[in-house]
Image (spheres, grey):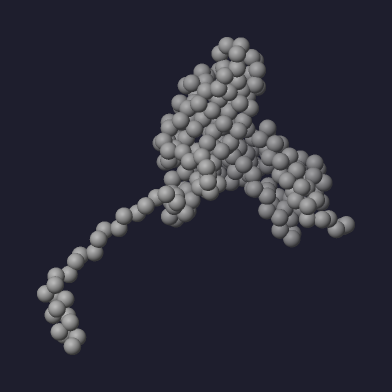
Amino acid sequence: MASISKARKAVADGVFYAELNELLMRELGGEGYSGVEVRVTPMRTEVIIRATRTQNVLGVKGRRIRELTSVVQKRFKFPEGSVELYAEKVANRGLCAVAQAESMRYKLLGGLAVRRACYGVLRFVMESGAKGCEVIVSGKLRAQRAKSMKFKDGYMVSSGNPVREYIDSATRHVLLRQGVLGIKVRIMKEWDPTGKVGPRTPLPDVVTVLAPKEEEYVSDKQEKLKAAV
């Protein structure tokens, strides 16, 4: 195999991930698709599909996952048996922005009112233990004129390094009869020292006030000094 520069390799990997993500998004949108992770080992390439309903992703006796494996292998020209697809269940779908954006997309396609769908997502996210949530829907909502509606609850940071660690965001497009609607979901996770539900590092502006130590009496200190002498 011809050597490839680092820049070309980075671009090729990015294009592969984007195309794979788009394929799985279209195929598994109804199964609560929440993202994909690609792990490259010397023996084979492992593709981990995160979804809320993993049983539907696997299919009857694993038929659907085998079909998807075959499609990925042929499309990206992998050698036989060198690519493996796995399904992983999302631990807490209420804190996953992609899962919530997909859920809202299907609600709107089903004919549910925009305001009701947004408040439903907002309530579910906050009940799942999020620190804050923001949902923005823009497009031709009711009239011919396009507008944007924003729904917020809780606390949300918008700048600095905590955005990278605390905010999970997702964007989806809904093709309705009157036009295309855009959905943006941003979820702020709660600080978790264990690192399971949220980030380990606390917010930089959080100040912890420690309880003062009990003061010793002067007589006790004098007795200690005498004992030391």
Q: Position of residue 224 (x, y in %)?
A: 17, 80
Residue furthest right in the image: 2
Q: Position of residue 36 (x, y in %)?
A: 64, 44
- 195, 152: nearer the viewer: 152
Residue furthest top in the image: 143
Q: Position of residue 43 (x, y in %)?
A: 74, 59
Q: Is residue 93 visible?
A: no
At x 60%, y 20%, the residue is 139
Side of 4 where 60 appears, left or right? left
At x 47%, y 27%, the residue is 151
Side of 73 where 30 appears, left or right? left
Among the 4 quarters of the image, the one containing residue 132:
top left
Residue furthest bottom in the image: 229
185 up-or-down from 91: above or below: above
50 up-or-down from 123: above or below: below
In the rendered image, the quadrant that contains the C terminus is bottom left
In the rendered image, the quadrant that contains the N terminus is bottom right
- 222, 16: nearer the viewer: 222
Q: Position of residue 197 (x, y in %)?
A: 47, 48
146 up-or-down from 94: above or below: above
Q: Count the marks.
A: 0
- 47, 95: nearer the viewer: 95
